[in-house]
Amino acid sequence: MQFVGEASAKMILSGEHSVVYGYPALAMVADLKTEVIVTDKPTEYEQNSLMAEVWKIFYRHYADIPHQAYLQQITSTIPIGCGLGSSAALACASFRALAKFHKIHLSDSELINLVQESEKVAHGNPSGVDATTISLDATVVFRKDMQTGQYTHEVITNSVLKETPFLLIQSGSPTETTKDMVTLVRETNQSASDTVDSVLQRMGELTQTVIDEVKRGVFVPQRLTENERLLEELGVVGEQAKQMIHSIEAAGGFAKITGAGGCTSGSGILLVYHSQPEVITNLAIEKQWKVYR
């Protein structure tokens, strides 16, 4: 028999990097999916190192299960290593499939904890925003308490962001990992603390403004630009992404990176809004950019 688990990609509307320092982040899911199929019969599907760890984590948590499921297939439309939470989505889809196979009910908190544990394997010391947003499959206000290390989240139930016609544009896969970019900001913070602390604080305040607006059912596209400029001040946006964003702005659009970023080549996926999406679609055709709706 086959058992299927599915998970969505995540996008950060505001607060990447500042979320690592205790400020809030606002994240949402995207219409890009990862699907994992498990079966009760041995297969020839070879697990990569992350999937092998996912299996170990699940069966370590449920050690009394008498037999093991086998990975049969992975399909995904989520670009890897581009700020959309591909590793968390892969883990989440796997845990959902394994839970179905073993007839285990996973609560939201159990699923988040399992995915977060797998994210530590993938990224070292992740904030938890990917695991939380993707596990809940929702728009989420996320915050880490710097005193206790505990995560808190709040789900926003209105549909304002779901009804907003965002586009995702590939600026190029970063050479750096998420861990590299978080380390870059941390090391810069230690050597020039006043400057970086100020940027992180302003990003935190901007994010809270965005959260308050979205809770009222309002999306203000200019916030994307404001957030992008702060990310550029942090030094996590490469020249290639900056040029693309400037072209989008010149066409009347708004854009920002939606992840940890990247400096030396691409900076991952750009989150883009224009009141007339076809303007950006046409620009992307002209520039030969890869676009996801």
Image (spheres, grey):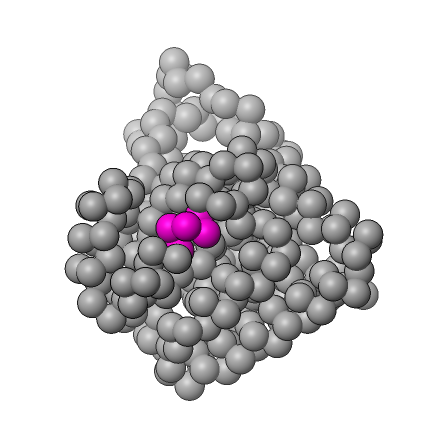
Q: Quadrant of residue 70?
A: top left
Q: Position of residue 285 (x, y in %)?
A: 20, 45
Report the front residue among 216 and 188: 188
Vertical comparison of 136 with 103: above or below:
below
Q: Residue furthest bottom?
A: 216
In the visual, does 280 lie left or right of 39?
left
Give the quarter of the figure containing the N terminus.
top left
Magenta span of residues = 241-245
Please identify the quarter of the rendering in which residue 80 is found: top left
Q: Nearer the viewer, residue 40 or 114?
A: 114
Asked if residue 172 lies in the magenta stretch, the reply is no
At 45% across and 52% down in the image, what residue appears? 242
Q: Which percent across, then down, holds residue 110?
A: 57, 53
Tell me, yes or no, if residue 66 can be seen here: no
- Does the image show residue 266? yes
**Does the magenta stretch mainly form a helix, a strand or a loop?**
helix
The relative height of residue 247 versus residue 47 in the rendered view (above or below) is below
Q: What residue sits 36% from the left and 44% below the top?
A: 170
* Residue 120 location (% of width, % of height): 65, 41
Task: Decide: is 137 above or below 222.
Answer: above
The front one of 277 and 153 is 277
Residue 97: x percent and y percent? 41, 39
Residue ID at (69%, 45%):
184
Left or right of 118, for residue 243: left
- The residue sitting at 24% across, 71% down in the picture is 275
